[in-house]
Image: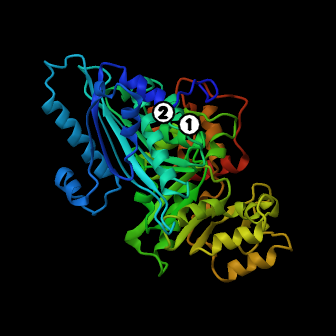
Amino acid sequence: MNDQERVVLTPNQKALKINLQQAIYGTFAEIGAGQEVVRHFFRAGGASGTIAKAMSAYDKDFSDAIYGKEAKGRYVCKPRLVNMLNHEYRLIEERLKRTDHPNKTFFSYANTIATINFSKTVQGHGWMGVKFQTSPEKEPNEIILHARFHEQDALLQQATTGVLGVNLIYGCFFLYETPEEFLLSLYDNIAKDQMEIDMVEMIGPDFAEVDNRLLSLQLVKHGMTQAVIFSPDGANLQAADVLYKKNILAIRGSFRPVTKVNIDMILKGIKQFQADPKVEPDQIQVLFEITLNNLTASGNVDEQDFLDRADILCSLGQTVLVSNFSQYYKLVEYFATHTNKRMGVILGANMLFQLFDEKYYRDVNGGILEVFGRMFSRDLKMYVYPWRSQETGDLQTTMNTVIHPRIKPLYEYLVFNKRLKDLEDYDPEILDIFSRDVLAMIKNGYAGWERMVPSYVDSIIKDYRLFGYDPETAPNADYQPPARVQKYLQLEKEAGR
């Protein structure tokens, strides 16, 4: 269902509809600037049927006395929100006997919000969530989200917090069965430029079939945020928690599927990045980035195809970034909002021509010079993995990439100053491996693709039948992989690998 097909209720209408539901009963706890949510329910009328308790743990000492101290001393964080939800929900169960309330579905709503500071150097953001039942006999669910507020006034950010909180609570009770519609409803009566939601998590008995990685994908797909991150175990992560003051090293690709080349790129990239004197080895955060335009290359987003790629990367212990950054400079700017330490980006030499092509920067006032100024004014190095031409067999590196004469001085400056560096000690025997060839071989039942992916990846693909793999499908007699692929497979066979 798209946004135009839904009937959008006002915050007052949503609050009143909840208040009139005799079964819904719970508590509100708000910290910091998030004192606006419960006000909507009080003003809508009929609040006595919904609100068992409303409180503001505004003072830090009082807050610590109620919820305990956080290990890192932070108040606007997910652990604090989780502590609030669990504490308040436990009190509901302790204080309200089921024998007296057999038909009630309990809930606890909580938030911890910080609005923009007076000097406007720190933007507002916050966490909010609901722990709730959908029927009296069920265990509770939890929905948690993180939002960043873009309005330049604290009062406006507080008002947005109030509307978002109402939308969240309403969605928990009336839209929980349709997660995508639930996500869209969070922006009811809120414009996209007022805030972004960069993390959503749904857990509980009613969300047993919900894959939180798909929720992350939906956030980017619907323009609710530009990028989302999830961990190797598939948990949605908040960017600041992952990237704050880290040496970030990113590799972009289709990973459809991961090949030996991808693994060689990241291993050699990490080795060279760690050797940099400005990089702290224990502060490196590696990210495998998949862009939205890569996921939509064939039209609409193929969710199963996305999950196939994610399953492999997660199985390899990797942290995945899904972004809407079609251009590298936007990716670097995103990283720079979280760290001022040295960053690295790994790319294939075949991408250099595109990176230095002026036509991709016509929508920027200063063109390519402004883009590269914004990108390399940060502490950034780009590591270039060699690429072998499929037509000529020539090896392409930073030393022989053909760049337009008008841009070549800029290119040579970056190479000379080692902001563009070739990756060393690469494996020359695997340069003829491309993901698209592996994918074609899998789909056409052509044997040998297993030798082109890392150990264990072939087993994952076979065990879970990813990327259309089907052992029962007869090989396609009309398909033949390129000659370079057949040569590589023959050499691997002769080597006993």
Residue at which label 2 appears: 11
Q: Tag 1, which secondary structure? A: loop
What residue is at 69 percent from the left and 73 percent from the top?
A: 373
Image check: 14 left or right of 418? left
**For residue 408, which quarter of the picture?**
bottom right
Q: Which of 404 and 487 is in front in this view?
A: 404
Task: Decide: is 45 above or below 56.
Answer: above
CA neighbours of label 2 inside 10 A, class few (<14), some (14 to 19), many (20+): many
State the scheme by which the image is colored: rainbow
The quadrant the N terminus occupies is: top right
The percent coordinates of residue 397 (x first, y second) are: 70, 70
Q: Nearer the viewer, residue 388 or 183?
A: 183
Residue at which label 1 appears: 189
The percent coordinates of residue 226 (x first, y second) are: 58, 50
**For residue 347, which quarter of the picture?**
bottom right
Q: Are marks 1 and 2 in contact (CB under 8 Å)?
A: yes
